[in-house]
Amino acid sequence: MAESPAKRAAKLRELVNDYRYNYHVLDKSIMSEAAADSLKHELSQIEAEHPDLITPDSPTQRVAGEPLPQFKKIQHSGRMLSLNDVFNNEELEAWQSRVEKLSGQKDIEYFADLKMDGLACALVYQDGVLAQAVTRGDGFTGEDVTMNVRTIESVPLRLRSAKGYENFLNGRTEIRGEIIMYKKAFEKLNQEQEKKGLPKFANPRNTAAGTIRQLDPKLVAARPLQFHAYDLLRQDGAETPTNDFIYKAIRELGLITNKDAMVAKSIKEVEAFAKKWEDKRKGLPFNTDGLVVKVNDRRLQARLGVVGKAPRGAVAFKYPAEQATTKVKDIFVSIGRTGSATPVAMLEPVVVAGSTVQMATLHNEGEVHRKDIRIGDTVIVQKAGDVIPEVVAPLVKLRGGAEKKFVMPKRCPVCNTKLVKAKAEEAVWRCPNNACPSRAWKQIQHYTSKDAVDIEGMGEKNVIALLQAGLIKNAADIYSIKKEDLLKLERFADISSEKLVRAIQDKKRPPLARFIYGLGIRHVGVQTAIDLAAHFKTLNKLSNSTIDELAEVEGIGEVVAEAIVEWFEEPRNKKLLEKFERLGVQPESAKEIRGPLTGKSLVVTGSLESMSREEAAERIRALGGTFQSSVGKETDYLVVGANVGENKLKKARDLGTKRIGEADFLKLIDSIR
Ligand code: IVH
């Protein structure tokens, strides 16, 4: 006999929920998105025929409902607090001392997590079913955004029943966390905005905040939001003894918590955690500006109480601000290594993320006008990681009327050649004069930079001094520099001259890939240079290659191939290469590294927990393997990290590429050591 619709619906619901839990919380895919969609479709058909079978926690009930006239105000069960900030280890230790003093305890255990940059939200589950979602608001009262939060896939409509955590399915369980938009989703959204000719969003946080406060849930459903939880509240505090336990419980109940959160036995361990994430956080799927540190014991946390808006038992450890405001003194045009003319803002010096910033790129003429940045404006500047500082936006309200609009010059400010655009639709103006002096020092600096031939002592100031003294005109000339020449210059003493000459001479046989990258050919980045070196083996072969031959190299398209051929055809560059040769510079042909991965091509998708993509690439290459950027016919393994879109996996599936997880990848590369 056929199963009853009620039974079938219940089973479908369970399976779809399992898929959701595995996908969002465990980063595991138990079936494809298409298969899950198909199950959902069947479920909605049953429910359409038997409306009495619809339950509020059914996955079909995520569909966006009708727009609201306004949000209802809801009072929080307990105030949603903020945190006091500390900015360094000293301040963190001062907080620790206060906690120790107030509690009369030493050796306190702490709990540290990454601080997500989103907006706080409280989810109320009644008997395990999502009943209400409320924004933080003023901490006492928030807005009822249940309709919108129901469209967030990573929020379960019903808590999972898990052994040992059954009590949380009875009565009221409040789960608090942060609504965020992942960086990738944000970028994609902005690309779509751009394609549609619509204005771009400023940052993931504002976009998430703006989205959740949309009155039309359909709009919310179209924007990929996430919910990462950090707190669980029950009437009886004894059910939640530690923050560590709370995180475990939340995951078991089917919500996301940050996996990197940790228990620290001492404040030193918290400091090590903070240090570890200071750079590594750039690779996280979401933005973070610091950590949240709490005492692990919840009873102690409660006992420590609240001052003002913040609990005494927790603190936010903030990394140096990556944004600051300052004034634009002037806008000038800088000519880059390849002749690109970039407007640059000269700023009143300001400290951003721990270093002083005096200049910030404005990218191109269009961007200056789009953002309406004027000379004299007070602006927000931003420094993200190693990226050069940029101007985010002007503070229009602070204008006094004397601000001046920027006019893109018609001629190169250095050599006075008329600026051109290769194609009308290109955003960038260029100085077409290959002999433009402004290019020389950037090219030399590029050649000697860390990722290229890596010559120490060739920083900006030294290169300029050498150029001004007429000792060098291009990158090859550096090999003819003698100690006696340097001693004549003010900047150099006996030891420093000797050191620099030795550093240069030591790099007469640079690895071919580094040398190719150092030439500064348009579109040829580190990876392309490595691919070219591996394919052509010698500089001679590369320099004589045709567009067709170049196109055979994996990952090289027409534009790049053309740029390479053009570069080697240019008489100035031919002369440069001759000079390198004359001065005895012989790039070392790419050595075949023989290793367990020789002949194997790997693609890494998503984020790995144990290393960055760059590290993974390096490890793969060191073992003789090829690191590819996208899956192709010749790919042997697709290494699947966290937060991978279904599309990427689909291509691998279509091509039959073997997929491995991080653990297997580690086994693969560890077998070598
Ligand atoms: S714990 C008393 N953990 O930061 C509030 N908060 O400045 C303790 N936040 O309102 C909350 N990531 O919205 C906690 N891993 C995290 C967090 C986090 C972001 C937000 C949260 C809170 C604000 C406090």
Image (cartoon, rainbow, N blue to C red):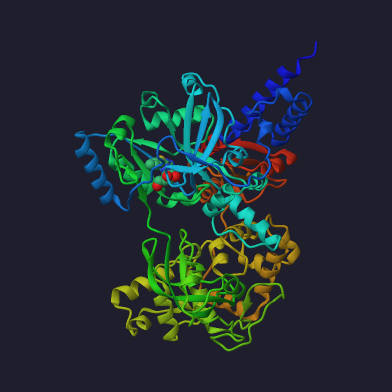
Q: Does 486 sit above or below residue 133?
A: below
Q: Quadrant of ligand 1?
A: top left
Q: Who's the residue at 21% across and 33% down the image? A: 105
- Evaluate whether residue 168 shows in this view: yes
Residue 144 picture location, percent across and down: 54, 41
Residue 455 picture location, percent across and down: 43, 67
Q: Who's the residue at 68% across and 40% down the image? A: 65
**Outermost residue toward the top in this view:** 1
Q: Horizontal placement of 498 versus 141: left or right?
A: left
Q: In this rendered view, identify the residue nearer to me: 291 or 45.
A: 45
Q: Does 107 sit above or below residue 439?
A: above
- Evaluate whether residue 673 shows in this view: no
Q: Report how many numbered discs are placed on residues in the image.
A: 0
Rendered image quadrant of residue 149: top right
Q: In this rendered view, identify the residue nearer to me: 651 or 125.
A: 125
Q: Who's the residue at 70% across and 60% down the image? A: 195
Residue 211 picture location, percent across and down: 59, 50
Q: In this rendered view, identify the residue nearer to me: 633 or 487.
A: 633
Q: Does 3 sit above or below residue 46?
A: above
Q: Who's the residue at 65% across and 58% down the image? A: 191
Q: Horizontal placement of 544 versus 290: left or right?
A: right
Residue 162 picture location, percent across and down: 52, 21
Quadrant placement of the N terminus: top right
Q: Horizontal placement of 437 versus 233: left or right?
A: right
